[in-house]
Image (cartoon, helix red, strand yellow):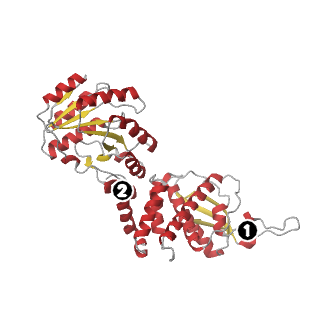
């Protein structure tokens, strides 16, 4: 058998090389990732190694006992690429390398699906790469759905050049947007942009940012809010432990005091956490605002009365587990005394989708009407934050992007979070 070996930086390049040399009906026999170059194992590059031959080399002979050809060994290059037993990488790939490899595979499948009708699927082949083949099958399904969306948007035309759109589609999935949200965004873009605009990735990116922004409810002018009655504008921050409530209170206080020139008072109800009181007191001294500790609902009423001449009062509460219903009920009693104009639920961007939704559901029992997202600088992905804020249905008020007071806080803007999803480069 005449078998050729190809080395390339990506699966896409390797497949293209096979097609140039052996034709579109070539059969891929083996695919694996190796590490080449470097010094003593350091600084090596990941290389795709692909072994292939022509179709006539593997076409089975018919016999009386077996008149039907073996489908698994007579596949074209495209079907072999999708259904062959792919050997797992000998050296584990990092997240970015695996993502780029998967992206190259998906793009190759996209081009094949655009140019060739997909035949009946080949029988599943058992082997050591079964899990990876399932991943490829899933990606193939996504590609087919993308093309269906495009064909639905322009049924009488050939599908537009989709590589730029699909590249961003994969970015949305990599940022943990759900398939439904990513498909909705793709459908909107392909149905509103002209074919030549779809070939411009920056134009498509801007359109996707605009579309994602529509999913994010925000509070208008959070730092410009004023009290609707004769009391100071009273804001309480609630949420689970460790999300940065105390630091966020200090940042909001500094923003009102230093940027808006308003008089501000701080109250803490957090007498559970070690050094919590001293932490907020230190911030209050730096900012130059009064700070008091309420150890009972009666004390809280007295402190609010003493601060009634101020413009803004911020209340820092103790962290509560969303599973601790007794503590959340206790927090509800404190808020009934304080009667805040706004209750901000503070959530960490580093938490999982399931955890964020659970926290939002449990804390909604105390009447939250705003959401603060903290630790955006530590978040791994941003796509699921769009869906979480949309599903919570409360207005996003502030975003925090680091530990520094008062700098690392900003008023929430829909486009800001949407841009983070597509830039995927972290908070700058």
Residue linked to disc 1:
74
Name above or below for residue 190 compared with residue 378: below
The x and y percentages for residue 35 are 56, 56
Query: Image point 32% across, 37% down: which residue?
Result: 367
Name above or below for residue 208 compared with residue 223: below
Residue linked to disc 2:
418
Query: Image point 47% across, 64% down: which residue?
Result: 167
Residue 113 is left or right of residue 231, and the answer is: right
Depth order, front residue of 98/420: 420
Residue 12 is left or right of residue 62, and the answer is: left
Depth order, front residue of 60/363: 363
**How many labels, in total?**
2
Query: Image point 26% across, 46% down: which residue?
Result: 409
Res 47 seen here: no
**Secondary structure of the residue carrying numbered label 1:** loop
The x and y percentages for residue 195 are 43, 75
User: For residue 113, which quarter of the picture?
Assistant: bottom right
| Name of the residue lying farthest toward the front | 229
Q: Tell me the quadrant of the picture where the N terminus can be found.
A: bottom right
Res 380 seen here: yes
Residue 374 is left or right of residue 124, and the answer is: left
The x and y percentages for residue 318 are 31, 30
The x and y percentages for residue 122 are 69, 62
Of label 1 and label 2, which has the lower sequence position? 1
**Secondary structure of the residue carrying numbered label 2:** helix
Depth order, front residue of 12/151: 151
Name above or below for residue 43 compared with residue 192: above
User: For residue 320, which quarter of the picture?
Assistant: top left
Which-is-in-front pick, marks 1 and 2? 2
């Amino acid at each position: 058998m005449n078998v050729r070996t190809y080395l390339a930086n990506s699966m896409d390049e390797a497949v293209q090389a096979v097609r140039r040399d052996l034709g579109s009906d070539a059969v891929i026999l083996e695919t694996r990732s190796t590490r080449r170059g470097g010094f003593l194992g350091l600084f090596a590059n990941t290389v795709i190694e692909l072994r292939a031959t022509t179709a006539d080399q593997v076409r089975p002979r018919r016999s009386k006992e077996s008149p039907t050809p073996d489908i698994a060994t007579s596949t074209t290059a495209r079907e072999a690429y999708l259904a062959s037993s792919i050997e797992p990488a000998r050296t584990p790939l990092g997240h970015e390398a695996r993502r780029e490899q998967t992206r190259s595979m998906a793009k190759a499948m996209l081009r094949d699906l655009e140019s060739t009708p997909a035949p009946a699927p080949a029988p599943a082949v058992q082997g050591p790469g079964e899990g990876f083949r399932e991943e490829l099958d899933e990606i193939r399904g996504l590609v087919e759905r993308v093309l269906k969306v495009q064909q639905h948007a322009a049924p009488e035309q050939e599908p537009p050049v989709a590589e730029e759109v699909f590249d961003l589609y994969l970015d949305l999935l990599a940022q943990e947007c759900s398939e439904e949200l990513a498909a909705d965004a793709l459908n909107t873009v392909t149905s509103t942009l002209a074919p030549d605009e779809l070939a411009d990735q920056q134009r498509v990116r801007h359109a996707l940012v605009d579309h994602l922004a529509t999913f994010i409810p925000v509070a208008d002018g959070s730092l410009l809010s004023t009290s609707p009655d004769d009391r100071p504008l009273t804001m309480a921050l609630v949420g689970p432990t460790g999300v940065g409530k105390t630091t966020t209170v200090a940042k909001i206080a500094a923003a009102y005091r230093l940027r808006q020139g308003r008089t501000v008072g701080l109250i803490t109800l957090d007498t559970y956490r070690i050094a919590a009181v001293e932490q907020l007191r230190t911030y209050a001294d730096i900012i130059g605002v009064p700070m008091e500790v309420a150890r009972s609902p009666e004390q809280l009423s007295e402190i609010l009365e003493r601060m009634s001449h101020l413009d803004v009062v911020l209340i820092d509460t103790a962290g509560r587990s969303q599973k601790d219903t007794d503590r959340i009920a206790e927090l509800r009693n404190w808020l009934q005394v304080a009667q805040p104009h706004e209750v901000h639920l503070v959530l960490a961007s580093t938490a999982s989708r399931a955890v964020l939704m659970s926290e939002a559901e449990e804390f909604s029992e105390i009447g939250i009407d705003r959401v603060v997202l903290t630790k955006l600088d530590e978040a791994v992905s941003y796509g699921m934050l769009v869906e979480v804020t949309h599903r919570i249905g409360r207005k996003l008020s502030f975003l925090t992007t680091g530990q520094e007071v008062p700098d690392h806080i900003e008023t929430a803007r829909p486009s800001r979070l949407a841009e983070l999803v597509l830039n995927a480069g972290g908070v700058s």
